[in-house]
Image (spheres, grey):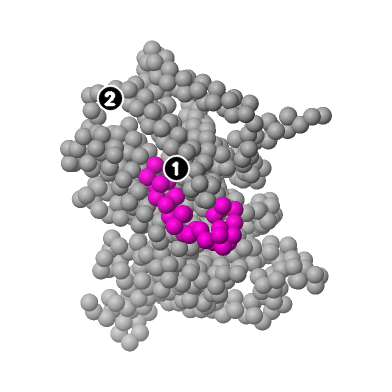
Amino acid sequence: MPSALQSYESTRKSWLIAGTVIAVLTLLPFVLNQLGRTGEYWLWVATEMVIMSLFSLSLNLILGFGGMVSFGHAAFFGVGAYTVALLMKKAGVGFLPAMVAAPLASALVAGIIGWFCVRRVGLYFSILTLAFGQLLFMITLQLYAFTGGDDGIHGIPRPELLTPLSYYLLCLALVAGSFWLMRLLTKSPFGLTIRMTRENPERAKFLGINVKRYQLINFIIAGGFAGLAGGLFAELNRFAQTEYLHWSKSAEPIFASLVGGMYSLIGPAIGSTVLIFLKIIIQQIHQGLVEIWAIILGVILLGMVLFAPEGIVGVYEKIRTQRRRPQ
Amino acid sequence: MNLQFMLFILINGLSQGMVLFIIASGLSLVFGVLRVINFAHGSLYMIGAFMAFSLSSLFAGKTLFAFLMLMLLVPPGVAILGLGLEVSLFRRIYRKEHLLQLLLTYSLVLILDGLTRLIWGGQIRNVPRPEVLAGSLDLFGLYFPSYNLFLLIVGPLLAAGLWVLLYRSRAGNYIRAAVTYPEMLGALGVNVPRVMTWTFMLGCFLAGLGGVFMSALANIDLSIGMERIIECFAVVVIGGLGSVGGAMLGSLIIGVGVAFIQIYFSRMALVFPYVIMALVLIIRPWGLFGKPER
């Protein structure tokens, strides 16, 4: 379980680490820009890593902090992506308003879906999220005239101001900002209440807390951040497709949270980055291995569930606290 | 909308429902006893279907003998696979929190689906029906496809067999006792882990059997695993986890519902199981035959 108390020394260390990481991430694109073609590719990868970190972080609000497994989170990611795609390509809306609309649209959808889902707990909640997620996926697939169905929406305009480098920095800024907001949220009374509903919902109810309402609000916030990630992703690749809403996309942040550590805030971001990195490495090693990526991912996940459910961050914390103990 | 057409749709829906029942009853049984929702159940069903495909080419498909061989060999094969899974993996997670159980079976879906793709490739396959069952029967001036009729007979037979197993045999008593009060059962000297293993194998057996029947009913490809597991969830949600009668009712509702909706609103047909599932979960989450959660 997460260590709620930290000594002053390690808090200062955390700030130092955070600052260093931000600095490195900010300088990264400038370095990559010098490397020509490969640099371009890796800049795109880095942007994708940043955006997907946000997606995984958003799910972990529900999963790690809320203790609820949601299999339909990609629905909100997809809603955000299609909002940006539709607004920018078909309605000629500008980049900024579209990026604001994306999280709002997905938050709205999350509100509707969430209202139904939080009525049940545990397994039934999870099945409901899966059902609604697939429902949304199929609706998007069927509305050919509106969403382009299977083909998706291609050719989303990219405003001139946004070069790959500046887009990366924009994403970094937005994701870092979102992370900071999430941090505030989880440390706030709201965040602590959510954690209580995970640990002991019965007790929370006896204390007069409307558990369903808190869970719904948490769900909506998570959906909103996922929508932002989706919107940024659509703009990055300049297209949106139905796969963004598929259950297999919902699996990615779940894995990322598990691998990185779902009981910490930064865990999912680490997990997401590690998994993307692994996927690319495997692609480079042997093209054929890409086909068994699903199997590899499944095996990694299996191993983590059995041996290290606290994820990378959890293992790191364990090592750190063990080293501190006097002989 | 003539009668023949309606009848055809109805028979089709009912037989799809029967196959679904076979699979879903396995899932329901496994959850009742092991308390683990096995996401990979759909993958096991899919593996059964593809195994049937491979074996059918071995036995040069069209004869009744070949089909009987499929029915006899594939389900135990899947059950043995299930044995391996239970002993190596499922056993370790019985005491873990639900979140981790869900994630474990979820990862199994990835692995099994990936292996299926690796071994059998992405093409659509099917198994030829045995000649005896390939045509249709002419009754009262209407045509009934023979294979579908066959399923309509086999389904209830299987349900009856399951009922006899669960309610009239010693093994069934153990299984039902393991659902209700495993600790007491252990105290009475029964090897409860072994009961759980056998139950899991039975569930996998049923999944495999469903796969065999489906392979001759319709085309199979790599998506049928996930499709079926979602429908299975809908079935056990409607019928209530652990109830064979409920699984039958739920399966028939889903089977017939999808078949009819496909005619009138073809695009919405795939959505039907999800809608029903969501509705039931919201209104009466323990299903029509189940009991409110402990």
In front: label 1 or label 2:
1
Residues in magenta?
A196-225
Q: Say which element carries label 1.
A: helix
Q: Which residue is mark 1?
A: A58
The quarter of the image holding the N terminus of chain A is top right
Q: Amino acid at mark 1?
A: Ser
**Residue nearest the observer in this picture, A188 or A176:** A188
In the image: residue B253, left or right of residue B95? left
Is A149 drawn above or below residue A84 in the view shown? below
**Residue nearest the observer in this picture, A161 or A90:** A161
The quarter of the image holding the C terminus of chain A is top right
Q: Amino acid at mark 2?
A: Leu
Is A185 drawn above or below residue B48 in the view shown? above
- The residues tagged by marks 1 and 2 sit, at their Cα atoms, a distance apart of 25 Å
In the image: residue B207, left or right of residue B224? right
Residue at (49%, 35%) from the top-left corner? A269
Q: Residue furthest bottom?
A: B140
Q: Which residue is mark 2?
A: A162
Magenta-highlighted stretch: main secondary structure?
A: helix
Q: Is residue B44 visible?
A: no
Q: Earlier in the sequence, mark 1 or mark 2?
A: 1
Q: Say which element carries label 2.
A: loop
Residue at (30%, 55%) from the top-left corner? A139
Residue at (41%, 32%) from the top-left corner? A177
The circle on residue B234 is none
- Percent x, y of residue B153: 48, 78
**Chain ID of residue with mark 1:** A
- Percent x, y of residue A284: 48, 26
- Percent x, y of residue A233: 35, 36
**Chain ID of residue with mark 2:** A
Asked if the stretch drawn in magenta spans residue A142, the answer is: no
